[in-house]
């Protein structure tokens, strides 16, 4: 079982719709969870982090965490074509310094 | 605040040659990571330093890859000898101390092509 799993996609949504991205992780000791966005040919950049169960909202983005189910998600409201990118889920595993492990990423296409 | 600096941006080498990459993290960041990102995949952690000590290198192919962070600041990653499957983007990232919101900041990466 991979440590951090994501559906590779591509996920295609129309402009203005809600995009829902999901991630599961295997290490129950994980402390914090991150969503990064990566445009083609660019480095990952942080969108949000979350470490408490529940929802965390920042503008059009909402991160949701359920530690019991080992599940974290990202909702993008009012999706824009500029949101088209690969979204990487990352987890800080509790292993001698909290190493950051990434999933393979989900490719999102927002159609104008 | 200056970001994570990496060099070179691009490198093309023949298989069995050696190559080295350099990274200078954000000032004051104790944690430094080297990731390998193969096209279409997520970043794979190769090695993590805390100051000048290695925290995790379980995914580093130690027969050909080596990394050091002698003074706890900048770091080099070396591949010797390179194989075709080493073609990837090598990302360096750094983060501050603490475990809850230790966001990793990435450099621009070095794109390695082995021919």
Image: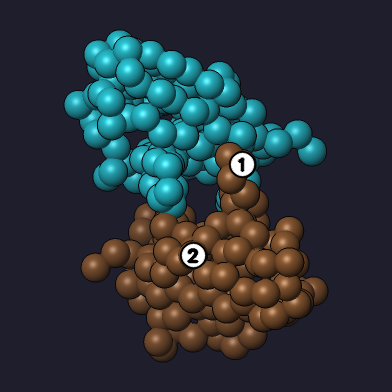
Mark number for residue A10?
2
Quarter of the image with the N terminus of chain B is: top right
* Residue contact at pointers 2 and 1, CB within 8 angstroms: no
State the residue in front, B55 or A106.
Answer: A106
Spatial CA span between label 2 and label 1:
18 Å
- Quadrant of res A36: bottom right
State the image coordinates of residue B87 (x, y, percent, origin top left): 37, 29
User: Can residue B102 be seen at all in this image of the molecule?
Assistant: no
Q: How is the image coloured?
A: by chain
Question: Tag 2, which secondary structure?
Answer: loop
Left or right of B47? Residue B24 is right
Quarter of the image with the C terminus of chain B is: top left
Left or right of B4? Residue B65 is left
Identify the residue at horizontal 37%, vertical 68% (top origin): A5
Q: Is residue B66 above or below residue A88?
A: above
Identify the residue at horizontal 26%, vertical 23% (top origin): B83
Q: Chain of mark 2?
A: A
| Residue topped by disc 1 | A42
- Which chain does cyan denote in the image? B
Q: Residue furthest front?
A: A112
Identify the residue at horizontal 59%, vertical 51% (top origin): A38
Mark 1 neighbour class, 10 Å CA radius: few under 14, some 14 to 19, many 20 or more: few
């Amino acid at each position: 079982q991979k440590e951090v799993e994501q559906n590779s996609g591509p996920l295609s949504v129309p402009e203005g719709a809600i995009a829902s991205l999901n991630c599961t992780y295997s290490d129950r000791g994980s402390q914090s969870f991150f969503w990064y966005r990566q445009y083609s040919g660019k480095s990952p950049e942080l969108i949000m982090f979350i470490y408490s169960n529940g929802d965390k909202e920042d503008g059009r983005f909402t991160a949701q965490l359920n530690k019991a189910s080992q599940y974290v998600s990202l909702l993008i409201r009012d999706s824009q074509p500029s949101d088209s990118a690969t979204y990487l889920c990352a987890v800080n595993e509790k292993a001698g310094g909290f190493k950051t492990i990434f999933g393979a990423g989900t490719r999102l296409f927002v159609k104008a | 605040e200056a970001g994570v600096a990496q060099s070179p941006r691009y490198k093309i080498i023949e298989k069995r040659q050696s190559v080295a990459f350099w990274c200078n993290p954000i000032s004051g960041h104790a944690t430094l990571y080297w990731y390998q990102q193969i096209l279409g995949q997520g970043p794979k952690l190769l090695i993590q330093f805390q100051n000048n000590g290695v925290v995790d290198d379980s995914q580093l192919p130690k027969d050909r890859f080596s990394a050091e962070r002698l003074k706890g600041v900048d770091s080099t990653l070396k591949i010797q000898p390179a194989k075709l499957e080493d073609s990837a983007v090598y990302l360096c990232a750094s983060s501050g101390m603490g475990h809850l919101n230790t966001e990793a900041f990435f450099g621009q990466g070095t794109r390695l092509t082995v021919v």
